[in-house]
Image (spheres, helix red, strand yellow):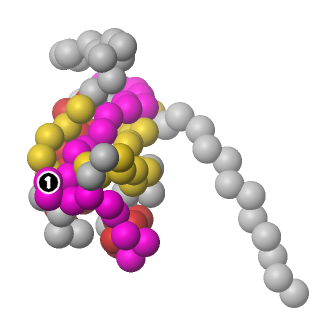
Amino acid sequence: MLATFGVVLMPVRIEHLDGGTKHMKTYEFDIVLKDVSEVSDDQADALFAAGCDDGTPAGCNGRAWIHFDRESTSLEEAICSAVAQVQTVGFTVAKVELDADASISLGA
């Protein structure tokens, strides 16, 4: 007999040893790939396996990128972790783009 399990997604608080609490937030950004015009299905599978399950490969006019909706405690942490995962697949990152309409608070 097969069992099925539902998945419930919810915000998580991270408790630090010093007693402080950091809140997770979802950050949206694009990682533009250098010298790549299209992400193949095999490359997309490799990205997913590397932890980029919150990224969506896209391309237009000979330019490819990965759009991320990444949960993290900071924008810097979200971008750094995504760039590291993209690079493990063998891609070179040309740049990171943020939505011009996005409101970003820097600092704590």
Segment tinted magenta in the rendering? 19-42
Query: Quadrant of residue 5 in the image?
Result: bottom right
Q: Quadrant of the N terminus?
A: bottom right
- Asked if 95 appears above or below 55 in the picture, the reply is above
Left or right: 54 in relation to 63: right
Marker count (numbered): 1
- Asked if 29 appears above or below 34 in the picture, the reply is above
Which residue is drawn at the image coordinates 37% and 70% (left, top)?
40
- Work out which residue is located at the far front of the displayed protein and give it: 61
Position of residue 86 measured from the top left corner of the image (x, y, whole percent)? 24, 59
Q: Which residue is mark 1?
A: 34
Which residue is drawn at the image coordinates 68% and 54% (left, top)?
7
Tag 1: residue type?
Answer: Lys
At numbered mark 1, what does the secondary structure look like: helix, strand or loop? loop
Residue 23 in view here: yes
Left or right: 12 in relation to 44: right
- Does residue 69 belong to the magenta stretch? no
Left or right: 16 in relation to 69: left
Q: Nearer the viewer, residue 33 or 83?
A: 33
Position of residue 73 measured from the top left corner of the image (x, y, whole percent)? 32, 32
- Work out which residue is located at the far right of the displayed protein and give it: 1
Which residue is drawn at the image coordinates 14% and 58% (left, top)?
35
Q: Nearer the viewer, residue 105 or 59?
A: 59
